[in-house]
Structures are given as C-alpha cells and as structure tokens.
Image: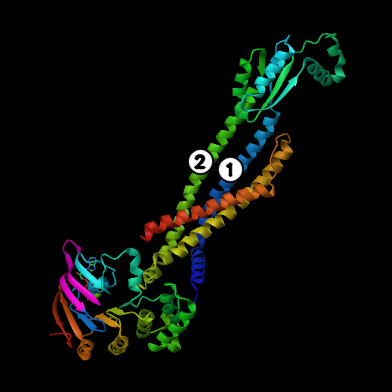
Amino acid sequence: MKSWSGYLFSETWKSIWRNKASSLLSAFTTGFALFLLGMSFLVSVNLRFIFSTVEQQMEIQAYLKKDISESETSKILEIVKNTGGVREVNYVSKEKALEELKAMFRDKASVLDTLGDENPLPASIRVRTEKVEDIPRVVGELKKIPGVVDVIYQEEVSRRLASVGRAIQIVSFGGVVIVGFVAVMVIGNSIRLTIYSRRHEISIMKLVGATDGFILGPFLLEGIVLGVLGSLVGSGFAAGLYVWIVQRVGSVLPFIPMLRLDFDVLCDMLGIVLVTGVMVGMAGSVFSLRRHLRI
Amino acid sequence: MISLRDVSKTYSENVRALFRVNLEIRKGEFVFIVGPSGAGKSTLIKLLYREETPTTGQVIVFGKDLQKMRRREIPYLRRRIGVVFQDFRLLEDRTVEENVAFALEVTGTPWRDVKKRVAQVISMVGLKDRKDAYPRELSGGEQQRVAIARALVRNPDILLADEPSGNLDPHTSIEIFELLERANMYGTTVVVATHAQNIVDALRKRVVELRDGVIVRDVRRGAYGS
Ligand SMILES: Nc1ncnc2c1ncn2[C@@H]1O[C@H](COP(=O)(O)OP(=O)(O)OP(=O)(O)O)[C@@H](O)[C@H]1O
Ligand SMILES: [Mg+2]
C-alpha cells in the first residue's frame, strides 16, 4: 500500500519499464532533438565568440587627405568618435605610419632607402566597431566626412561572416523545430502505448472516483521523465561531440579561435536542453492524453 | 436518494433502451431490477453512476441532477457509489488486498487509514486468508467477493450491482447475495440488476420489472415473475 507520491512514482517507473522499447525510442528521439538543440546552442555561442574575436581584429582604415591641418584632424576625430556603433578610434599620424612601415620591413631597409627623406604615407584613422554588422554603415558614414579621401576595410570577410552566421542559425533552428516536433510525436506514441496497456486500470480508476488529475499524474510524469532522459542523452552527445570538434579544429586549424567547453557554457547548455526536454515531454503526454483518454 | 423522472435513453435512431421511466428509490432500500435480455437493466444502472446520461428526463442522485453535474464533480459522486459487475473487473497484477486498497489509493486516502479499512472489509467478505492471492488464483465467487469488498471499502451510500452472479453457480450466487444483503443491513442502498430468478423469489425484496425499456411492474416484497 502506497501514498500518493509513492503511487505516482512506482506507476511511472513500471510503465516505462513495461514499454522498454518505446520508452527507449522516445528517449533517444528526444535525445536526438535535444542533441541538435545543444549543438546549435554551442555553435551559436561559438559563433558569437568567433565574431567577437574577429571583430576585435577587424579594422576600418580611413585615410585623410595629404595636407590636412591639425584642427581639421581633430574635428574629424570628433565626428568619428560620435558615430553610432564605433567602439574604438585610433589616430595614426604620417610619422607613426612610417614607423610602422619601417618596423615591418626592418630586415629590408633598402626598400625604404628609395624613399629618401620624403614621407609619402597619409595620416589615417583606424576604427573598430561594436559589431561586424555595423561595419558597412560606419564605412558609409566615414566616407561622407570631408577630409577623408579613402576608406578601406575587409568588406568580403565581414559580410560573409555575418551571412554564414545567420545561415547556420536558421538551419539549426529549423532542424531543432522539426526534430522537436518528431520527438513530441514519439513521446506521444509512447504514452499512447501506456494508456493502452493500462486502459483497464484507468477504467477502474474512473469507476472508483479517481479525479482526472490523479489519473493524468503518472502519464504526465512519464512524459517528463522521458523528456529528462532525452535531455541527458542529448546533452551528453552534444558535449562529447563538441569537445572532439574543438580538439580537431585546434590541431588542424589552430588559427580559428574556438571556445573551450567550460563549466559555465556546459551549465547553460544543460539548462536550456533540460527545460526544453521537460516541455517536449509534457507536450507529448498532453497531446496523447487529449486524444486517447478524452480527459 | 435516487429519483428518475420521465427518463428515456436512446442509443441510436432505433435503439430505445429506456422509455419514460419514473422510479423513486429511498435511502436503505434493496431493489431488484429484473426483465428479459435487452430490457434496459444495465442502461438504468449506468445512468445512476453517470456512465451514461439520459436522452431526456432527469436522473437525480443525492439530490443532484446528474446531467447538470460538472465533469470534475463526477469522481466525488462515484466515491459515494460502489459498483459491481458480472465480470468482476479486478486488476490481474494486484493481490486481493491491493485490489481493494486501489479504490482508496487512487482517491488520495492517507495510507494509514487505507490499511485498517482494507483489512476490515476483506474480513467482512470472508477473504482474510486469501488477501495475498492474485485474482487468477481465486474462484469466480471469491473474485466477486473481492469486487464487492472494493465497492464497499469506502462505505458507499449506494451499491449498484449489474448481474453480480451472472458467471457463478447457484450456490455461490446465494453467498454473493448474502453479502449484498449484509451491506444493505449496514444502511447502504442496494440496486441489483439480475436474472437470478430463485434468489429474487427467495429474498422477497422490492422488484422493478423492465420490458423493452418500460417499467411494467414495481412491487414491494415481490417475486421474479408476476
Ligand atoms: N452502448 C450501446 N450502444 C448502442 N446500443 C446499446 C448500448 N448499450 C445497450 N444498447 C442497447 O440498449 C438496449 C438495452 O440494453 P441493456 O444492456 O440495458 O439491456 P439489459 O437489460 O442489461 O440486457 P441483459 O440482460 O442482456 O444484460 C439493448 O437493445 C441494447 O442493444
Ligand atoms: Mg445487462
């Protein structure tokens, strides 16, 4: 003889065990959906990390006209600093530019000898933006400033990065939605089998006056348990695959900055996956109960 | 306690199970519902615990019109009504004790109370020694006793039985009816649909006879046939 919660848990466990095959299938399908979710979370966290790294390196260079005066320069600097999306502004004077050039060609001093005492380099302003997406707009703004003769930036790189990022997010979101939908169906089916195998018991429960909530309890819990099992499977695989990819990429393409899977990121992923798993599980059971129990 | 007012039940176009039935059953009564197969006995029983609702007319139990009752009130109606069937309807994977306790467990009774009450009712139906047996290890009569114990475990105000001896031999049937009478002596209102002619004749209770869904006879201290 059991208390209510004892009843709830033992019934749930019994029915999962009784329908081992379909429970396993549900847990794995949900696991697959949640694996995709976990991966797409890790990918997007990573993209953000890569973006921000690249962004920090990505500079816009605005060259100033040759014979620019100091007051004009400071006016331009003021305008640039006040442009939206601009994070960092560095002024590079003619002299500084030359120094940098010399440093770059330290070993081949002869190349610079041909310049004589003349400094042919223009002064420039180096600008970094908050986000990659801001670059084209900031470039436009810079071009409009009088005194700025040319604006150079890595247009292709920034544009591609942004569109690749967007594409990956759309595709992975689509995948998550589709597989999530399948997971709801599969869990629903598992619950349906449980309802079928327990139909006799359910009819007696109704006969002796069990409330709908009491009858539903074990089924809802079963859905949730399947969802949680799926979450664990899914995040386990996602974390494993991710660690493997990071090692692979690290050894083959060491220049690509990738985020290590640290505790915080892992917790975030687990949290998102778990919450989604529970919701998928509940959705599956409610869907099935509505259809087959008319409660 | 139970009141049917001009009740008709039509399952489909031409299947008329009950037609303009009026019936009053008072607290503490013992009533037999008799009649040929298809007369509407089971339908009448089903109306009383709201397994079915009437097509027209009112079914009033405990002063409540069952048709107007909300869905979530139904469980509480059923907790006051015990029901027994011809086919026992026990759970095969549970022992006698567990089958009886089931009715209390699934209605959220604290388990301390469950244990005591289950023991009481099991000994009342005479199955104290078989409380750990599974239904398949019991005779038909014993299984029906378990079903009766489950129906009575909550001390219901009404006990409904639809051909409780339909699957039993005459001797065992008598024992089952003795249990129903016993419950009635403790104050439970009992309504039994049955074909057991000799028992109806012997017990001399109120008899309501149905034919083609119509009450053709309703007598105190009656017999199976008129
Ligand atoms: N669920 C149902 N759907 C359609 N028709 C039904 C249903 N239940 C009963 N009937 C019909 O209603 C009529 C009365 O049936 P009911 O079961 O009440 O008779 P009964 O008196 O209990 O018969 P028996 O003695 O054989 O058990 C019969 O004609 C039967 O076929
Ligand atoms: Mg019948």
A77 and A71: which is toward the camera: A71
In the depicted structure, whether residue B195 falls above or below residue A278: below
Amino acid of disc 1: Ser
| Image position, residue B82 (x, y; %) | 33, 77
Q: Is residue B94 above or below residue B204?
A: above
Quarter of the figure with the C terminus of chain A: bottom left
* Amino acid type assigned to the residue bearing label 2 in the image: Gly
**Which residue occupies 56% across, 57% down?**
A229
Q: Main secondary structure of the magenta part?
A: strand
Determine if residue B195 is in view.
Answer: no
Helix, strand or loop under label 2: helix
Q: Point out residue A202 in the picture as x, y percentages from the top left corner.
A: 39, 68
- A51 vs A223, left or right, is right
Taking the magenta stretch, the answer to whether it contains residue B21 is yes
Q: Which range is magenta?
A: B1-24
Residue at mark 2 shares a chain with residue at mark 1: yes
Report x, y in % for residue A286.
43, 56
Q: Is mark 2 within 8 Å of ligand 1?
A: no
Q: Quadrant of residue A247?
A: top right
Mark 1 lies on a secondary structure that is helix
B20 on left or right of B101: left
Residue under label 2? A174
Indicate the colouring scheme: rainbow
Residue A110: in magenta span: no
Name the residue: 18% across, 83% down.
B207
Q: Chain of mark 1?
A: A
